[in-house]
Amino acid sequence: MDWKAIRDAEFPVAERWAYLDHAAIAPIPRRAGEAMRAWVAEQETNGCIHWMTWRKELEVVRQRAAQLIHAEPTEIAFITSTTMGIGLVAEGFPWFEGDNVVTPAEEYPSNLFPWMNLASRGVETRAVRSRDGRIWIDDLLAAMDDRTRLLAISHVEFASGFRNDLDALAEACHQRGVALFVDAIQGLGPLTINVRRTPIDFLAADGHKWLLGPEGAGLLFVRSDWIERVRPILVGSNSVTSSYNDPEPAFTLKPDAGRWEGGCYNVAGLLGFGNSLELFLELGPERVSERILDRAEGVRDRARSAGWTVLGSDLPADRSGIVVLDRPGTDPNAIVRNLRVSGVAVSARRGHLRISPHLYNTDDDLDRLAEGLCEFS
C-alpha cells in the first residue's frame, strides 16, 4: 500500500501538521470535503430542486456504514452524535423499576450520564472501577445480578486507550441474558468490528474521530431482534412508512432502524461521512487497522526513547490506536501547547499526554513528535 500517495491525495492537513490527535477530532479527507462542498453549492444554486437525489445518496452511505461493521442496512440508523445513539437506547430500552446497568467508571461522560439519568425511573447504574490500568471482565461480571439488563462499555477507553475484549464480553453477557451496548467511537478505525461474529446488541459511533468524518454524522446499530423491543424516541415524519404528504399520514413505524431518524438529516455531514467510509472500504478496514496500530507502536517506541513512560498494558490484545504517555514533573497541557507551536497536534486527557496517529502519518510525523518530547526529557 502506497500510504504516501494516499496522504498526498487525500489529506491536505499533512501539508502543515504532524496531526496525531484523531481520538479528539480528525481532519477530513479531501473526498469528504468535496462531497460537502458539492452539497453546499447545490443548495446555493438550486435549493431543494434535486433533494431526492441527495436523499437517495444517503442510502448509499447507510450501505457503507453497514458494510463496515458487517451489519444489515436495515440495522443502521443515522445519528448526529454518539451521545444521541446512547440516549436513544438508554431511554427506549424496556426497563423495569429495580433494573440496573453496569458500566466502567472510566467511561467518557456520554456513556455514563445517559444511564445515570435513568435513576428517576428506578434504574440503577453500577460503575465499576478499573484496576492496574485495565478493566477486568471478572469485575464487571461481579457487579451483575439477576436484575442487570445491560452492560454499556466502550470498545476502547478514551483516556487510557485500553481495548476491551468485545468477543469475551458478548459471550459473558449473553450467557447471563444481559444486553451489550458498545460505544465504538474510539475503536472503529484502529480496530475492526464484525457484528455478525461478535453478537453486540447495540453500537453507536459518530464519525468525527477515527472514521475521518465531519462532526454531526454517525451511525447507530440496533440488532434486528431488538428493533421491535426498544421504544422509539424522537419520532417524526422519517420514522414511519407513510409520507408526510399523505392526506392522513398513518403512524406505522418503519420495520427497521430508520424509525429512529425522526426529523431532518444532516445531509452535508452524512455525505462527507459516506465518502470517508468509501475510503476505508477501498483500502480495506483490516489493512487500515494494521496501519494505525503500526503507527501507534511507532509512537510508543519513540516515546520510550525520549524518556517517557508509556502507560497501559504491554499485551498487544489490550492496545489500540491511542497511546498515553507520562513524565513526572511535566504539565501535559503546556506540552500540548508547545507541540502545536512546532506543528504537532496531540491532546492531554486526565493528566496525561494522549497521542493518536492515523493511516497517513509518516515516520517523519512521528520523528517530529519525538523531537518535541525530547525537549521535556
Image (cartoon, rainbow, N blue to C red):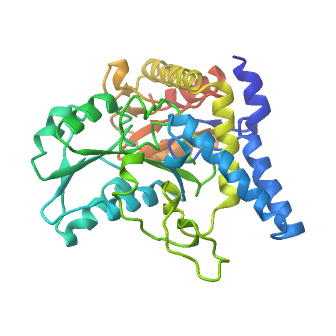
Using the image as rendered, state which of residue 237 and residue 286 is in the foreground: 237
Q: Residue at x 48, y 46 (%)?
A: 334
Is any part of residue 28 visible from this angle?
no
- Please tell me in which quadrant of the rendered image residue 22 appears: top right
Q: Residue at x 37, y 31 (%)?
A: 198
Describe residue 97's horizontal placement relative to residue 161 as left or right: left
Q: Looking at the picture, does residue 66 appear above or below residue 94?
A: above
Quarter of the picture holding the C terminus: top left
Describe residue 355's horizontal placement relative to residue 151 as left or right: right
Whole-percent x and y of residue 175? 19, 35
Which residue reaches farthest bottom?
247
Whole-percent x and y of residue 90? 33, 60
Whole-percent x and y of residue 9? 79, 32
Q: Looking at the picture, does residue 91 appear above or below residue 207?
A: below
Which residue reaches farthest right?
45
Describe residue 178's horizontal placement relative to residue 155 as left or right: left
Quarter of the picture holding the N terminus: top right
Whole-percent x and y of residue 356? 51, 35
Q: Residue at x 70, y 22 (%)?
A: 3
Using the image as rendered, state which of residue 366 and residue 145 is in the foreground: 145
- Please tell me in which quadrant of the rendered image residue 210 appears: top right
* Circle count: 0
Using the image as rendered, state which of residue 235 and residue 126 is in the foreground: 235
Is any part of residue 353 visible from this angle?
yes
